[in-house]
Image (cartoon, helix red, strand yellow):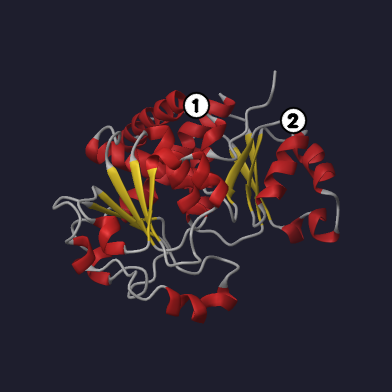
Amino acid sequence: MNTQHFLTLNDLPASTLKSLIHRAVELKALTKSGAIFEPLKNRSLAMLFSKSSTRTRVSFEVGMRQLGGGTLNLSPNDTQIGRGEPLEDTARVISSMVDAVMIRTDDHAKVTKFAEFSSVPVINGLTDDFHPCQLLADMQTLYELRGSIAGATIAWVGDGNNVCNSFMNAAKLFDFTLNIATPTGYEPNSKIIEANKTNLRLINDPNEAVFNADVVVTDTWASMGQEDEKKQRLNAFKGYCVDQSLMNKASKDAIFMHCLPAYRGLECSAQVIEGPQSVVFQEAENRLHAQKALLEHLLA
């Protein structure tokens, strides 16, 4: 039997992803009720971080603990990876001792190679190309607030980054239209565009992208590893700040989402992120519940 990994949303069929969202809602209610539910008792999750993290680390660590298991938090300096041990050797060894591995790193090929040599499920906690766990939480949030997202219009405003790539996969799997507004030269991955083109509209004008949209989403303009491009990007993204004027062009009951961390006054205004249309903190909390559903699915 092949080991089931979760490196992109496309690793699971749409029906399973939707079941995970429903299960995440159930687990959230269970947690809020104070019930003890430990299907992963004595199971362990190794977490390999080569990028800093707040939501990913806390949600996986607390999630595993609430499910009865434990975690090991490892950086490159904590392992022989930092001294040049081949990734495939590390994968074989770590996966022989734990029940699952979560990796947060830069190059997506590293996660793919680790999974190739791992005997246990590998979860992508973020790479430069994809952030599928974030999309599980986002889809859960939209389900809690609106029910089925099928047929809706979501507007992405900003950089065509890893979260945008995962949103494109989600558009096809959950059957919504994704309007993508980016400056020229900052469009998302062309191969992912081609694979999901029936559910996408690529637009340079953010005003056109958000017009009558049900959801407006943005992210930081300079992701981790792009700090040296910050000045250039600040110039390129002028006019792409999601402020109240832009939100007013969306549907009157439109939702604002951001995966955080957010930089007020750049990709979004303080008025929008702190306003009544913003669901960013519900979205952030749902990282915990969506990932618990994922861990239960992969391990229980």
Residue 40 seen by the camera? no
Q: Quadrant of residue 101?
A: top right
Q: In the displayed structure, does residue 276 sit left or right of residue 18? A: left
Label ID, residue 119: 2
Disc nearer the start of the sequence (1/2) = 1
Residue 163 at x, y percent in the picture: 47, 52
Residue position marked by numbered label 1 in the rendering: 13
Residue 153 at x, y percent in the picture: 28, 45
Residue 99 at x, y percent in the picture: 67, 32
Label ID, residue 216: none
Q: In the displayed structure, does residue 158 sit left or right of residue 186? A: left
The amino acid marked with disc number 2 is Ser
**Measuring 26% from the left and 56% from the top, which residue is drawn there?**
210
Work out whether residue 90 or residue 212 is closer to the camera in this orientation and state it: 212
Q: Quadrant of the N terminus?
A: top right
Look at the numbered discs 1 and 2 and tell me whether their residues touch, using CB distance below 8 Å.
Answer: no
Q: Secondary structure at mark 2?
A: loop
Distance from disc 1 to disc 2, alpha carbons, whole Å, reads 21 Å
Q: Secondary structure at mark 1?
A: loop
The amino acid marked with disc number 1 is Pro
**Measuring 65% from the left and 33% from the top, which residue is drawn there?**
121
